[in-house]
Image (tube, grey):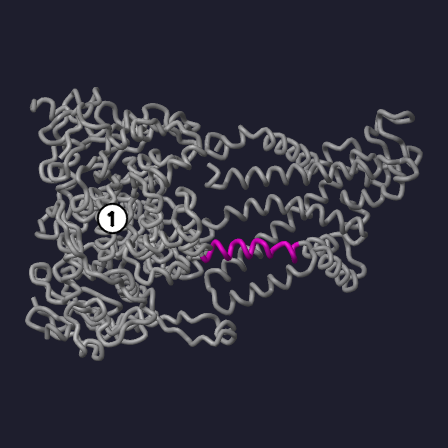
Amino acid sequence: MSTSAPFIDVQGLSKHFDVSASFLNRLIEGKPKQNLIAVNGVSFQIEQGTTLALVGESGCGKSTIAKLLVGLYEPTQGSVKLQGVDVHACYRSPRALQLRRRVQMIFQDPYASLNPRWHVQDIVAEPLLEHGLMSNATDIEQRVGELLSKVGLNPLDRIKYPHQFSGGQRQRISIARALATQPEFLVCDEPTSALDVSVQAQVLNIMQDLQTQHGLTYLFISHNLAVVRHVSDRVGVMYLGRLVELAPTDQLFLNPQHPYTRMLLEAIPKLRDTGRARTPVQGEVPNPLNPPSGCTFHPRCPQATDRCKQERPALRTMGRIQIACHAVT
Amino acid sequence: MHSTQDCNKTMALLDVQNLVVEFPTRRGNLRVLDGISFSIEKGEILGVVGESGAGKSLTGASIIGLLETPGRVSQGQILLHGQRIDHLNQEEMRHVRGKKIGAIFQDPLTSLNPLYSMGQQLIETIQTHLPMNHQQAQQRAIDLLKETGISAAEERLHYYPHQFSGGMRQRVVIALALAAEPELIVADEPTTALDVSIQAQIISLLKNICKQRGAAVMLITHDMGVIAETCDRVAVMYAGRIVEIGPVVDVIHSPAHPYTAGLMASIPDIFHSRERLNQIDGAMPRLNAIPSGCAFHPRCDKHTEQCKTHRPELMHAGATQAACWLVAKEGV
Amino acid sequence: MWDSDLGYSFRHSPMAMVAALIAFICLFCALFAPWVAPTNPFDMVALELSDSLLPPIWQEGSNPKYLLGTDDQGRDILSALMYGARISLLVGLASVFLSVIVGVTLGLLAGFLGGILDAFIMRVCDVMLSFPAILVALLISGIGRALFPNANDALAFGVLIVSITLTGWVQYARTVRGSTMVERQKEYVQAARVTGVSSLRIMRRHVLPNVMGPVLVLATIQVATAIITEATLSFLGVGSPPTSPSLGTLIRIGNDFLFSGEWWITIFPGLMLVLISLSINLLGDWLRDALNPRLQ
């Protein structure tokens, strides 16, 4: 099924943050203005009904991309299009509410993503009321009950407060809230990172079922490659604000091309490797305020050349994958 | 691997016998650890794994003697080299801590005092437990930093915690824990707050440095992968009890307890994607509402009448020990 | 409520229970003064000059009709206490109520919207804090009197309440601003944004319920402070009008008689003032400790 425009089309997305000290401090201490480039020219597409995962370590910008897509941040450069419509222009216009019906977000922290002073009923019903989808109180109650059942909770739980639920249950309430407006696109920012393994399994299963039932499109942000393997159709690997590799899931895991992807896969402790000694790659993620020149990964890369220190590799398409690496392309 | 019922072996380094920890609340005594028993041999790495609320951090805290009041050890004993340490007062425990038992916690940022340089903290710890003057302590601090992989150690001695990255801070915490040459290190989620690539480095460091010194490690974590790569034996905890304990290979690849089996099956595997992850329905019971008999029985699809009424103790199940009546029935 | 953590803490704190009892009695007497007080001391017709300067009942020369004695105009001290407490509490509660409204609103706006508005409000706070409350109150009172020389009672009270409010709102603004800045980062606020809820609604419906905790404690304690401030102003002669004297006014009136032996005219209003503010302060202390999640 190929449509003319991909469902989600991100082109050259960049986000800069001004993290300079206050004016007075800069004046007195003679410090320059400091710009943090959290996202640096990222492009990708997502087909409708599929899941794209973004993985990377701290400071790679994946959470920033999530917030850019749902309109919590304005991009410094680049564009995000939903079925050909520029998303940020829409968020600024009076038609913003319509767009927000179609795009929703699930957050990482199940304890902070629900207002502790509100009943679950009110939390899940808020999108319905805000978008004027329903006005009759009984209808709303029924719809909330339906949504809670969909995520595997008891509809009668809607009178309770968030603190009466466990982490996994709270995350399900978040999902129920996100589904209230029948969205088409769901951005999930590390939705299971704060959950125990067995609870994670429950939540991931629910998310998969819902995707099949409703034809949802997911952008799944995570640092856990095993989870990503399980849920996604395509995976994008990020490092210091840039995409270094983008490939179909199976291909990425069976045949990783980029040295960083290889390093990540190698670094994950694996269940089958009991007692195996391994030499991990040295180095840490550099300070995003002062990134290395050229390819930002070169200080840690076993295949770095002089060219890598000077020239930043562009994201090139090679068959089914896209990769930004001088050694490979 | 070790068999825990061998009476002829030398005395274990750490022996925990029937440990019960309670928190008095206004609604009655809350039992957070209910009869924990295990031992750690000299130089062995024991993993303690479980989900949140299982009591693994509390076990570590009881051993180090950092149980938050009003929590207290109400039954059982903790023996270090055959000597009881659970009933020592704060002053006595302070001497044990650091000298005999070292501790590594999860968040390196809060484990270090932000107002003192790394060197000062290291030297202070060294001088508290070892008879050295300032010069000797400083040299030892430098050696420790080098050993934990921090380059330019002499210079870095004067750095403050905020000037280090997360991974380096955790290395310093490890150096601090090892400063007085303890025989046992209790590490509570030492890598959870770190990036994946750094996790690998830190785990590798911990393993090597402890093996070199012959120090035993009690590694508390929820990450089975870390356990698989690092530990010799592992104890699986559920609702304040140990449900299975044994060599790592056996517990992971042929678990005897249904909870352990369920847990293993619900971990997503990086090597192949499955259609659905296996899930254990329900959730771990709250500590004030633990089911009678076997705490896991409401979530176990193989439970019997006996499981509802009688709490199973750890019993032999092939290469491991599991607290499960089904195992007894199979009669190993 | 009784069974909750707060109720449990209350039941196990003798100090809180005693303080609550005293505060309740004072409040009751003050609220229902016209029905509870033996006489109406401010009814000119009922006063009997012959009954003036009578000592309290346990001293010689007293009249059982006036339990705590009378002042120079024949007014029953006990009744005057109740009426006076009424005025004091009224002014105290009103000014705290206003302070909370102004302070919480400004604090929410400053914390949530940030930027120039935040900087501006905080500078105003800094300026207000650098003035002692009494001075500000004196200033406002003075201006009020100059503007409305023939003011009736209501206006005088209005000016009084405004002058106490003017410095009282700052602490709420600061506390709420801090809490708001924390809550603003939390994911439930971001979730509301993603849903499309306007900033104003988020502030009012999401953030406000979560920042009110410390405000409650502050307000309780500030009632006592406001009462004392009002008493001070009245003592200085720029507070409550003499026709509706508050406890402070009574103290001032009685002050003149202190050294001529009629000590009861000033001591009893003073004691009443101490009792009210002390009990409220103790209640506020207990509430702060009981609401503090870290102290279990």
Determine the residue positioned at 49% across, 74% down: A29
The chain letter under disc 1 is B
Q: Say left or right for C216 vs B53.
A: right
Numbered disc 1: secondary structure: helix
Of residues C286 and A83, which is closer to you in this image?
C286
Residue B256, percent from left and from top: 12, 32
Determine the residue positioned at 25% across, 51% down: A193
Q: Which residue is mark 1?
A: B209
Of residues A237 and C117, which is closer to you in this image?
A237
Q: Which residues are magenta?
A: C165-181
Q: Is residue B42 above or below residue B116?
A: above
Residue B42, percent from left and from top: 23, 36
Q: Quadrant of residue A18?
A: bottom left
Check the picture and name the quadrant holding the N terminus of chain A: bottom left
Residue C218, percent from left and from top: 58, 47
Q: Is residue B219 above or below residue C78?
A: below
Determine the residue positioned at 9% across, 49% down: B275
Amino acid residing under circle 1: Ile
